Image: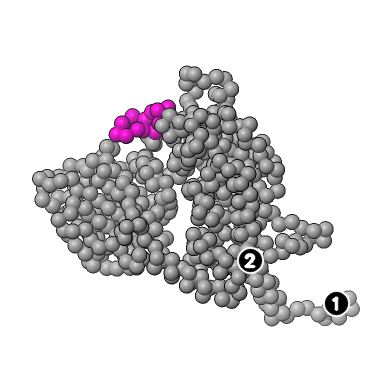
């Protein structure tokens, strides 16, 4: 029996608790609406535009996936891939597959003598001043590259220049002294691993020469220096640094919402920090490119009508997409006889002529029986699923079947034919085609990029290892800096080669 102190208390029913939770969920979803996200993106993009105006000589680079949402297509100068997870506390990492070496020529584009620069744009979620990608991953990248490209003891460099290349620069007030010290302790190992990839080569020269490679790709001879800017920081003075450095200006586009004296966010109540995150949950397949082309229409459309409008914009964009000249695919040469790329349009490109020396592998977003894959003597149309993760997992089985078709093609007509070439295409040109090309590169080609002796196929088991796969992947990523093969895809390649 209740006592006198509790007799008059009324406890909420389970139904009342459920209703209360539903109301809170509805309020949260209304705050995270598409309209609020797009308006928040525009507000953050306005800050990025101010940064670009402040540093007009610097190229605007989007750190993918989020960075492109804050840079209009007409002002974007390129993309980079620096992951925040590579900068998480205790997990600091220099990625051996996201080398981002393509950024170096951009830094020197207009500055053959004085140090150049770029503005690397990213955002972060609620409550943080800057993402780990900019505060830790990029600083590690700069330090490791500096030490690899400017080796200790190189002639003609004074003590100050030597110190510049050895220093790890991190943002004060964001990275603690203890964390900085722990990151620095890992740098020598990262440098050694990078040198082991053999990416600092020129032409067909198999020897790695970091100094010669640097003189070609970083001609002003300046090491890299990260600098940071956010909406709540003063403008950094970079001119004083450019005599000694190429400046990587790490720009956090999003800001921490301001709170009033009452603890409420006031005018920032509808602002979403890092609004471009998690696009798979809200964007309905809208891309940054399509957003900036139709931003006026999107921003003036009521929330209830946005999904339908976005579907219309995406559909129109897919129908109009295609490389110049009427081609239905683009490809990048990895070796003289192997390329990877993207097919565009409503369906894969037609097979090459049967008299062609090209074997084409095209991935489609559907599941098909492997008996239907072969569409011509030198073409495969492979369906391993509709979702990238599923395709990546299924690739480990698909590669064995693809290998058999390629072996048959290479052995056709014996040795009395021109060298045969392999082309791998997928709808994005970044994941499945890259992973498949990696598997074929390791299996069918030697270190010089030449096709192995066709009489040796199929190869015996146990001849591949992770070091070989890692080196070959680095060569692909150097040729295709936009590529971003998923973990599932790379695991499938490892399984195929090492089983």
Q: Residue furthest right?
A: 4
| Left-right relation of 343 to 214 | left
Q: Residue at x 45, y 38 (%)?
A: 105
- How is colour applied across the structure in the image? one colour
* Label 2 packing within 10 angstroms: few (<14), some (14-19), many (20+): some
Overall secondary structure of the magenta section? loop
Residue 389: mark in rendering? none
Going from N to C along the chain, the mark reached first, 2 or 1, is 1
Q: Is residue 450 magenta?
A: no
Instruction: Name which residue lies at 41% across and 50% down.
Output: 483
Q: Is residue 441 left or right of residue 125?
A: left
**Residue segment shown in magenta:** 200-213
Please name whichever residue, 421 or 314, is drawn nearer the observer in this view of the structure. 314
Identify the residue position indicated by label 1 in the image: 6
The quadrant where residue 342 appears: bottom left
Q: Is residue 170 above or below residue 492?
A: above
Place of residue 242 in the rendered image (x, y in percent of width and height, measured from the top left): 58, 32
Mark 1 neighbour density, 10 Å: few (under 14) some (14–19) many (20 or more): few
- Whether residue 353 is situated above or below residue 54 in the rendered picture: below
Side of 370 relative to 254 (left or right): left
* Residue that carries the numbered disc 2 in the rendered image: 36
**Cα distance, mark 2 to mark 1?**
45 Å
Q: Do the residues bearing badges 2 and 1 touch, measured as CB atoms within 8 Å?
A: no
């Amino acid at each position: 029996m209740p006592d006198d102190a509790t007799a008059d208390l009324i406890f909420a029913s389970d139904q009342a608790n459920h209703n209360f939770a539903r109301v809170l969920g509805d309020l949260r979803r209304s705050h995270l609406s598409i309209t609020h996200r797009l308006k928040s993106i525009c507000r953050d993009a306005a800050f990025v535009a101010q940064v670009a105006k402040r540093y007009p000589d610097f190229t605007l680079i989007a750190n993918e996936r989020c960075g492109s949402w804050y840079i209009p297509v007409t002002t974007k100068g390129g993309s980079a891939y620096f992951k925040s997870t590579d900068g998480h506390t205790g997990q600091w990492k220099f990625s051996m597959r996201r080398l981002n070496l393509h950024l170096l020529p951009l830094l020197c584009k207009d500055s053959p003598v004085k140090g150049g620069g770029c503005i690397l744009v990213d955002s972060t979620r609620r409550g943080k001043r800057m993402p780990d990608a900019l505060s830790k991953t990029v600083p590690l990248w700069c330090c490791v590259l500096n030490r690899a490209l400017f080796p200790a003891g190189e002639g003609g460099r004074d003590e100050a220049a030597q110190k510049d290349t050895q220093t790890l620069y991190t943002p004060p007030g964001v990275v603690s002294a203890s964390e900085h010290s722990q990151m620095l302790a890992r740098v020598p190992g990262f440098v050694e691993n990078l040198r082991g990839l053999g990416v600092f080569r020129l032409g067909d020269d198999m020897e790695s020469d970091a100094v010669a490679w640097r003189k070609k790709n970083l001609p002003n001879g300046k090491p890299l220096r990260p600098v940071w800017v956010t909406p709540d920081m003063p403008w950094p003075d970079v001119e004083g640094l450019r005599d000694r450095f190429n400046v990587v200006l790490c720009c956090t586009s999003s800001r921490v919402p301001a709170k009033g004296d009452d603890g409420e966010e006031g005018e920032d109540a509808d602002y979403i920090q890092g609004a471009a995150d998690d696009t798979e949950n809200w964007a309905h397949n809208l891309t940054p490119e399509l957003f900036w082309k139709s931003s006026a229409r999107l921003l003036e459309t009521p929330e209830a009508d946005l999904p339908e409008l976005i579907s219309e914009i995406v559909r129109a964009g897919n129908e109009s997409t295609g490389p110049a000249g009427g081609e239905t695919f683009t490809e990048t040469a990895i070796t003289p006889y192997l390329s990877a790329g993207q097919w565009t349009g409503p369906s894969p490109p037609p097979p090459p002529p049967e008299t062609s020396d090209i074997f084409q592998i095209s991935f489609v977003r559907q599941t098909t029986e492997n008996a239907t894959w072969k569409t011509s003597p030198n073409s495969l149309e492979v369906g391993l699923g509709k979702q990238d993760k599923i395709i990546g997992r299924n690739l480990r089985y698909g590669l064995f079947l693809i290998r058999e078709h390629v072996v048959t093609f290479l052995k056709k007509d014996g040795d009395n034919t021109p060298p045969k070439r392999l082309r791998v295409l997928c709808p994005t040109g970044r994941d499945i085609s890259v992973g498949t090309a990696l598997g074929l590169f390791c299996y069918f080609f030697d270190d010089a990029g030449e096709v192995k002796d066709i009489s040796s196929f199929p190869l015996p088991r146990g001849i591949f290892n992770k070091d070989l796969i890692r080196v070959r992947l680095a060569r692909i990523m150097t040729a295709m800096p936009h590529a971003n093969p998923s973990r599932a895809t790379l695991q499938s390649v490892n399984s195929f080669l090492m089983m």
